Image (cartoon, rainbow, N blue to C red):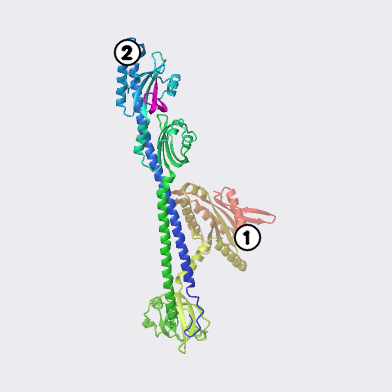
């Protein structure tokens, strides 16, 4: 902290940093608003399309079900009439004119009654094998009419159809109106073709029905034969009726009865982009398509998009105005701060460091002022601290050394010093002190800022502990083990004494992980570490090198027998079952022993030989140990325990 009469450091240009922050904040707000606008536009469009697909699919299903019911009723009327006609003698065989007239009238009444019972049907017509109309539900007597050139007559004459034949819109001979024709074949007593019975449905009635249920702007309903022939449509397109449109995607996606789906395509009839829902009947060769022009669907979305964009622009304008107000306020605050900057004095010096304990005292240590943090850290009131001496609670630095520091302190060179403060209740805590001298009113004063570093030191110790110890078992890790091995090598070389290095590897540990899970494996490693510690002396060290590998340092051994006894204890300890959360774990230990200096005089050699001996123990059947022995000209293994 600069003294009151010292030259203040150059200040930054006013508002540079706040202005930059405001600009960045404004740009971020604008970017967020634009992103939200685009997201809302996209989500609104997606919701609109999803709702349209749902509406089209629901309406399509209802229309198809209605059409299937109507066709079923029509076909039943055909079947009923055909059955009753089959039970009557052929009209053409009757020679008596009176009887023939009576029979013809009876046929007319029969067909009329079926039409009355089936509202969907306009007329029922009976045709003989030569195409002559014998009876008509709408008129009696029937004028001379012949339908042998009609496609449905030729087809039923030449082919026995199992389903009712559905024909494209046809103009009737009776009144010239367009009708959908549903027909079935008549068969004589010997199975020969005896004529056709047909039901006609008014195309105008079908279109009127579609008009009554379709309330979508730009919507259309089309009824197709499964061979892609257009049977009916609303809005009406008379020139398209009876034409086939196999190129449409909906027919490429309908491989069989009962198929349904949705698509977006350009209509081959009117060239407009449409959302379509199509569904083919399961019982009859018909397909219903309900569609809506994409342009009409998106009309409300465009209005909504404009509204969202305007709202986004409005939000940007409001944010800009708000940022402008903040900028003006910052300008006022900067002017006020500039006016106050020259009169802050000692109060500002205290407040700026309010996060640390602040002590203002003379070179002899007599305290003249403190802040609240200083009172809180020492547990003493301000009144008791003022007038007392710093060395009353500073216990980390000798008083003479502290006084010497205060007297020799350069006003331009503050120093950092570590110390310890004592709380009123008696406990001590470490502090980091920043000590500076300055002149005030012709006097030399000392400003000491003390920061409690208890948590920082604890955290540093925790980091050091974590860096050198295994997180699962708490044992030293490979880094700390290598350091301890180096220290032990240096001590053993100076004192000319032996020590042993044991490599311990757990056998069958993988099976425990695979069968009981990794949590059980971790629990087994923790228990194995505890058993290893239980087999050692206080002066010995056990470390986890990684996975299921451990290393043991026997600090001082009289000979190989000491190391082998410890190895036997470890083997026995690992042979006991490990109680685990999901059952018992069973492992064993393979141990390699290397003695210093017999097996090597440096860390690398000892580690390599202990590792080699451990693998020899594994190769020899596991659950035992091997000791590395070097004889001039050859390498041998000491006797190991094999279980």
The picture places residue 474, in percent across and down from the top left corner, at: 49, 60
Above or below, 335 against 623 in this view is below
- The residue sitting at 43% across, 86% down in the picture is 366
Indicate which label's residue lies in the foreground, 2 or 1. 2
Q: Which residues are magenta?
A: 164-186
Residue 42 seen anywhere in this rendered image of the structure: yes
Q: Secondary structure at mark 1?
A: helix
User: Which residue is tagged 1?
Assistant: 604
Above or below, 19 against 104 in this view is below
- The residue sitting at 44% across, 41% down in the picture is 274
- The residue sitting at 47% across, 67% down in the picture is 23
| Residue 178 forms part of the magenta stretch | yes
The picture places residue 501, in percent across and down from the top left corner, at: 58, 59
Q: How many marks?
A: 2
* Disc number placed over residue 100 in the picture, else none: 2
Q: Residues within 10 Å of mark 2 (few under 14, many from 20)?
A: some
Q: Quadrant of residue 175?
A: top left
Q: Earlier in the sequence, mark 2 or mark 1?
A: 2
Residue 423 seen anywhere in this rendered image of the structure: no
For the stretch drawn in magenta, the main secondary structure is: strand
In depth, the one of 563 and 222 nearer the eye is 222
| Residue 5 forms part of the magenta stretch | no
- Contact, mark 2 vs mark 1 (Cβ under 8 Å): no
Q: Residues within 10 Å of mark 1 (few under 14, many from 20)?
A: few
Q: Secondary structure at mark 2?
A: helix
Q: Separation of disc 2 and disc 1 at Cα?
A: 123 Å
The picture places residue 86, in percent across and down from the top left corner, at: 35, 16
Above or below, 246 against 566 in this view is above
The picture places residue 585, in percent across and down from the top left corner, at: 47, 49
């Amino acid at each position: 902290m600069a003294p009151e009469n010292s030259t203040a450091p150059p200040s930054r240009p006013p508002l540079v940093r706040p202005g930059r922050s405001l600009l960045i904040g404004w740009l971020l707000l604008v970017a967020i608003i634009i992103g939200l606008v685009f997201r809302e536009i996209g989500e609104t469009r997606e919701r609109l399309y999803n709702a349209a697909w749902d509406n089209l699919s629901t309406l399509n299903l209802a229309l198809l079900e209605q059409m299937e019911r109507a066709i079923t009723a029509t076909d039943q009327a055909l079947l009923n009439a055909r059955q009753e006609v089959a039970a009557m003698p052929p009209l053409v065989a009757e020679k008596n004119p009176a009887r023939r007239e009576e029979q013809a009238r009876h046929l007319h009444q029969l067909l009329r009654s079926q039409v009355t019972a089936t509202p969907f049907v306009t007329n029922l017509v009976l045709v003989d094998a030569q195409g002559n109309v014998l009876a008509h539900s709408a008129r009696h007597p029937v004028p001379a009419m012949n339908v042998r050139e009609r496609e449905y007559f030729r087809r039923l004459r030449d082919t026995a159809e199992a389903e009712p034949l559905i024909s494209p819109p046809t103009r009737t001979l009776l009144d010239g109106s367009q009708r959908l024709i549903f027909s079935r074949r008549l068969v004589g007593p010997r199975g020969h073709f005896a004529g056709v019975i047909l039901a006609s449905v008014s195309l105008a009635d079908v279109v009127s029905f579609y008009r009554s249920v379709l309330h979508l702007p730009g919507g259309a309903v089309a009824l197709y034969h499964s061979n892609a022939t257009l049977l009916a449509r609303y809005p009406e397109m008379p020139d398209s009726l009876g034409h086939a449109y196999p190129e449409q995607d909906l027919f490429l996606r309908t491989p069989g009865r009962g198929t349904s789906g949705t698509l977006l395509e350009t209509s081959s009839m009117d060239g407009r982009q449409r959302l379509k829902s199509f569904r083919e009947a399961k019982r009859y060769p018909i397909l219903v398509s309900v569609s809506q022009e994409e342009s009409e669907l998106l009309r409300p979305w465009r209005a909504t998009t404009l509204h969202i964009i305007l709202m986004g622009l409005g939000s940007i304008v409001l944010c800009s105005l708000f940022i402008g107000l903040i900028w003006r306020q910052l300008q006022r605050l900067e002017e006020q701060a500039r006016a106050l900057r020259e009169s802050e004095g000692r109060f500002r010096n205290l407040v700026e460091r309010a996060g640390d304990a602040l002590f203002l005292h003379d070179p002899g240590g007599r305290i003249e002022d403190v802040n609240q943090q200083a009172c809180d850290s020492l547990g003493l009131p301000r009144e008791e601290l003022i007038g007392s001496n710093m060395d009353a609670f500073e216990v980390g630095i000798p008083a003479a050394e502290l006084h010497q520091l205060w007297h020799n302190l350069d006003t331009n060179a503050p120093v950092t010093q570590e110390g310890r403060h004592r709380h009123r209740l008696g406990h001590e805590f470490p502090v980091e002190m920043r000590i500076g001298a300055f002149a005030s009113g012709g006097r030399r004063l000392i400003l000491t800022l003390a920061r409690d570093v208890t948590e920082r030191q604890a955290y540093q110790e925790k980091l050091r502990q974590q860096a050198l110890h295994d997180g699962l078992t708490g044992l030293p890790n490979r880094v700390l083990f290598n350091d301890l091995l180096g220290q032990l090598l240096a001590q053993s070389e100076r004192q000319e004494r032996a020590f042993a290095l044991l490599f311990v590897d757990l056998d069958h540990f993988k099976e425990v992980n695979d069968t009981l899970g990794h949590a059980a494996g971790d629990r087994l490693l923790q228990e194995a570490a505890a058993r290893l510690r239980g087999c050692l002396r206080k002066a010995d060290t056990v470390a986890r090198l990684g996975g299921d590998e451990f290393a043991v340092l026997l600090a001082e051994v009289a000979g190989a027998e000491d190391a082998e006894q410890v190895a036997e204890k470890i083997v026995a300890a690992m042979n006991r079952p490990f109680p685990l959360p999901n059952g018992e774990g069973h492992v064993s230990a393979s141990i390699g022993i290397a003695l210093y200096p017999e097996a090597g005089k440096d860390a690398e050699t000892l580690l390599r030989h202990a590792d080699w001996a451990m693998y020899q123990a594994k190769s020899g059947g596991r659950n035992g140990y091997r000791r590395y022995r070097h004889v001039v000209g050859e390498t041998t293994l000491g006797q190991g325990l094999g279980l």
